[in-house]
Image (cartoon, helix red, strand yellow):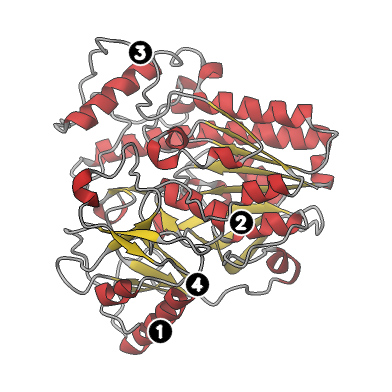
Amino acid sequence: MRCVMVMFDSLCRRFLEPYGCTDTYTPNFARLAQHSVRFDRCYAGSLPCMPARREMHTGRYNFLHRSWGPIEPFDESMPRILREGGVHSHLCSDHTHYWEDGGATYHTKYSTWEGFRGQEGDRWKGVVDGVALPELLKPFTEPGRQRCFQRDEVDRSYFAKDEAMHPQNMTFSAGLEFLRTNKDADNWFLQIECFDPHEPYFSYDRYKALYPDDYHGPQFDWPDYAPVTETPEQIEHLRNQYRALVSMCDDSLGRVLDQFDRENLWKDTMLIVCTDHGFLLSEHGYWAKNYMPQYNEIANTPLFLWDPRLGTAGQACGQLVQTIDLPVTILRFFGLPVPETMQGRDLRKVLQEDAPVRQGALFGVFGAHVCVTDGRYVLMKAPASPDNAPLYEYTLMPQHMDHAFTAQEMQDAQLHPGFSFTAGYPLMKLPADRSGFAYPDLLFDLESDPQQLHPLEDEAVKARMTALLVQLMRENDAPQEQYARLGLEA
C-alpha cells in the first residue's frame, strides 16, 4: 500500500475549475477531478497554519485548547504511527513554519524529511545591509512587518530569474524524486506540501500573462491582514496575482499526475489533494483569514481523494467531512490501528456508500468564534462578554510562531491535571488575551444564502445548531471556561 498527499496552503476552492471557477486556469485540477472524488462539503477544523497541521497529525480539533504551537509530547501523530508501524513516511515541504519555534516538532515525526527555504520572508539568505524595498502600495509601519518584507525581497532575488529554483518547484521535484526512487517499493506515505498559494503571491511572467489587467501601480502581491481599503483596480490586480500563483500550483500538481500516469500508480496508490484553509481576497470586506468571522471562503476547503481499492472517480460527494478525517483515513488505508483520541472518520465509507460520517463539524480560530455546521446551516458563536474572558491556553510547549511565551505570559501559569486525550500528562494552564474580537453571533443558511451575505434570524434553527455545537464541544473535551466564554451551559 502506498499513499501520496499533496497539500497546498491557503488554496481557495472558488479559484479552481472543478468547483465552478471559469476565470482561473487550472487544467490539472480539472484533470485530477476526473481521477478522484471531489468533496463539496469539506471543512477545516482549527485555523490557521500550524493548528491545521496539528489536526493533520492528531485527528482531533486543536483550537478549543490551544493556539499556534508545536506537536505536544502526548499527541498521537499519524506520520509517527506510520513510521512505527512499518510504513515509511516522508515529508517534502517549503513551509517555513515547520522550522520555527512554533512548528519545530512536526517534521521529526516522519521517517525522513527534506525542506526548502525562501518563502514569505524566510530568514534564509544573509544580506547584511538588506535591500531597498520597492515602493509599497501602502506603508507598513510595524518594524517586524517591514523586516519581513525586506527579507522577502532578498529571498526572491535568489529564485526570481530561475523557476526551477523556486521553493515550490524544489519541493515538487523532491517529491517526484521520492516517487521515482521508491516506485517498486511498498508501504510508504509521501507528503508533498508547498507553502503556495499562500501570500506573498510571487510567480513568473508566464503565469501572470494569463491574467492581464490595467493596474500600473507599485508592486502589490502581498495583502495586509486588514479590512479592504483598496480601489477596485488594486483589488483585481491582487486577485490576479493570486490566480497566477494558483496556476503555477496547478502546473506542479500536473507533474505529480504525470508521474501517476507514467508509472500507473493509480492501481495501488492512494492520492489525496487538500489544503489547510482558504483566504478572503476582499470578500466580506476583508483580506486574510484569521481575525474575522470564518466565512465559507476560508472554512469550506477543496478536497480530492482517489482510493485504488474502490476505483471511484469523476464524481462529487456532498457528505460533510473535515481535515481531522485525513489521518484516520490514511491509517486505516495501511491497516494500522487508530488511537482512541483521534476523532476523525475513515472516508472509505463515504466513498463506498456515499454515507454520512458525521452529524456536524466544528471549526474556528483559538479565542474567536466557535463555529459549527451541519452542512446546510453555519452558526458562529461569539464571546458573550466584551473582554472575551475567560480564555486559557493548555500546553506543555509554550511557543508562539517564532518565539517562546514571555516571562510575563508565564507569570500566572497554573498546573492543570489534563484532558482525556493527554495520556495522563498534566498541562500548563496559561491566561490568554484575545481581546478586541467584537463580532456578534452569526447564523447562515447556505442553501438560500451560499455567499453568507444575509445573517439569518431564526431562533429555532439557532437553538438546534447551538445544541449541536455544545454536543461536539463535549465530545472534544472542551475546557469548561470555553462554555462560559461563549455564554453556554456546559
Give the label, 4 or 2, closer to the camera: 2
Which element is circle 1 on?
A: helix
Which element is circle 2 on?
A: helix
In space, the residues marked 4 and 2 are separated at their CA atoms by 18 Å
For image coordinates 24% across by 25% down, the residue present is 147
Q: Is residue 180 left or right of residue 16?
A: right
Which element is circle 3 on?
A: loop
Q: Which residue is mark 2?
A: 326
In space, the residues marked 3 and 1 are separated at their CA atoms by 54 Å
Q: Dot 1 surroundings within 10 Å: few (below 14), some, or many (20 or more)?
A: some
Q: Can the viewer see residue 442 in this picture?
A: no
**Amino acid type, label 3:** Gly
- The count of marks equals 4
Q: Which residue is mark 3?
A: 126
Q: Which residue is mark 4?
A: 375
> Upstream in the sequence, badge 3 or badge 4?
3
In space, the residues marked 2 and 3 are separated at their CA atoms by 38 Å
